Image: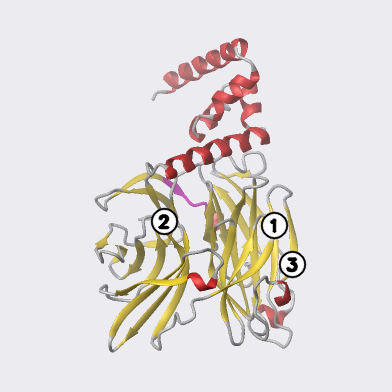
């Protein structure tokens, strides 16, 4: 579009907005704007001061988010939604640190249709995506000198927020610590929360700690995880000495794998009442030749994957917790021969039960029930995520920083 044509279009939009403001009340205008997509709203900010005032108001941002959530839930309940694959990939013919965040629709014929692509800002160069929720992404670093710096990023409006958690000051602990970060949405008070778990691998005083960030208050609170405070925890297992990613958001709680000197379990954190809980793993999930394990969301349920490789062959055991929080409900639903080859990295599951892995050939979709395997056209994905909606939001519009 030429510069003159763009100028004419903007003038028409301003005239329409002025007329709309004269004929309609602010409540009606706000209701109309609340049903528009994010891209349209960002353009309408330039049309008039009244539109900009409405769109950047925190109350409107929350209302717009709720409307989108309700619409998304309606599509899921009627099974009329598509599933979306999110992944990061390096930008060709650019510096090694240049990456794109891509969103594609997973079609019924196992092809992918790209719906959006965002360039990841260079200021996130030393950070990786660790979670996403309702259009908001969380980035963190596993480097010990940077793991207290966390970013929230809304690519649809090109806004970000830099958060500073508590850094390690003890040099002995600094060399042997691990941090795990998870992002969640608190539906009760419409707040986004970040859980940062710290574990110290060595030392007589080694004990896991937690920090909780609330976007609504823009503040951190430090919490010590005492074993006695875990609801359902069995005694005599010792202190938590290691916490492994990822941090999965499911059923209103974040879940990560915790390890004591003699015990493995899933540590859950309820984002509504901010309580920790221990979830026991299946009674016998590990084969003698188990290479690695992973917890995930499988068809909306908490699941545990155990990958084993031996002379008898390679298998993936899939356990599902049929009743959330009840250890006795763990059921092994599949023992799947691993017919793919090469080093395997587990990437996650879709809502319809497909398992996504990555090996030397690229990204692979695998149906454990039919054992159908499909090699997708994504070869260099660094990070992979899945969502039942491609919802964009205005979160951070009135409290973040703009990036080019």
CA–CA distance in space, label 3 to label 1? 14 Å
CA–CA distance in space, label 2 to label 1? 32 Å
Q: Please, which colouring scheme is shown?
A: secondary structure
Tell me where residue 277 sits by quadrant: bottom right
Crowding near the residue tagged with mark 2, few <14, some 14–19, many ≥20 C-alpha atoms within 10 Å: many
Please tell me the numbered disc located at residue 87: 2
CA–CA distance in space, label 2 to label 3? 32 Å
14 sits left or right of 312 in the view? right
Look at mark 1 in the image and give the residue it sits on.
Answer: 273
Q: In this view, does 289 lie above or below 249?
A: below
Look at mark 3 in the image and give the residue it sits on.
Answer: 223
**Residue under the image location 28 percent in, 57 percent down:** 377
Crowding near the residue tagged with mark 1, few <14, some 14–19, many ≥20 C-alpha atoms within 10 Å: few
Please tell me the numbered disc located at residue 265: none
**Residue under the image location 66 percent in, 39 percent down:** 398
Q: Which of marks 2 and 3 is nearer the N terminus?
A: 2
Q: Earlier in the sequence, mark 2 or mark 1?
A: 2
Residue at far front of view: 328
Taking depth in this image into account, of 321 and 76 the one nearest to the observer is: 321
């Amino acid at each position: 579009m030429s510069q003159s044509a763009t100028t004419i279009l903007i003038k028409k939009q301003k005239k329409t907005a002025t007329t709309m403001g004269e004929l309609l009340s602010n409540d009606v205008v706000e209701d109309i704007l609340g049903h528009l997509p994010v891209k349209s709203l960002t353009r309408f900010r330039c049309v008039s001061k009244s539109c900009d005032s409405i769109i950047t108001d925190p109350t409107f941002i929350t209302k717009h988010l709720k409307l989108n959530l309700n619409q998304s839930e309606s599509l899921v309940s009627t099974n009329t939604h598509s599933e979306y694959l999110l992944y990061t990939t390096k930008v060709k013919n650019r510096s090694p640190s240049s990456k794109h965040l891509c969103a594609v629709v997973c079609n019924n014929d196992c092809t992918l249709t790209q719906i959006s692509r965002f360039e990841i800002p260079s200021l996130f160069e030393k950070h990786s995506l660790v979670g996403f929720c309702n259009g908001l992404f969380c980035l963190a670093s596993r480097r010990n000198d940077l793991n207290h710096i966390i970013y929230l990023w809304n690519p649809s409006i090109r806004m970000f927020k830099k958060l500073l958690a508590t850094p390690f000051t003890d040099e002995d602990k600094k060399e042997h610590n691990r941090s795990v970060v998870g992002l969640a949405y608190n539906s009760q008070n419409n707040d986004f929360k970040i859980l940062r778990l710290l574990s110290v691998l060595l030392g007589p005083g080694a004990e896991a700690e937690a920090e909780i960030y609330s976007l609504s208050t823009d503040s951190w609170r430090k919490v010590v995880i005492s074993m006695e405070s875990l609801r359902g925890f069995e005694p005599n297992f010792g202190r938590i000495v290691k916490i492994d990613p990822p941090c999965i958001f499911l059923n209103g709680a974040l879940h990560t794998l915790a390890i004591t000197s003699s015990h493995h379990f899933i540590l859950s954190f309820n984002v509504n009442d901010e309580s920790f809980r221990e979830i026991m793993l299946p009674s016998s999930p590990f084969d003698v030749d188990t290479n690695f394990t992973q917890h995930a969301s499988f068809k909306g349920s908490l699941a545990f994957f155990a990958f084993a490789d031996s002379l008898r062959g390679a298998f993936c055991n899939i356990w599902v917790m049929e009743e959330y929080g009840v250890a006795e409900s763990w059921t092994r639903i599949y023992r799947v021969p691993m017919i793919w080859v090469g080093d395997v990295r587990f990437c996650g599951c879709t809502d319809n039960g497909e398992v996504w892995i990555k090996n030397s050939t690229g990204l692979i979709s695998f149906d454990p029930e039919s054992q159908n395997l499909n090699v997708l056209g994504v070869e260099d994905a660094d990070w992979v995520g899945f969502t039942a909606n491609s919802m964009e939001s205005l979160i951070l519009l009135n409290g973040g920083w703009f990036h080019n």
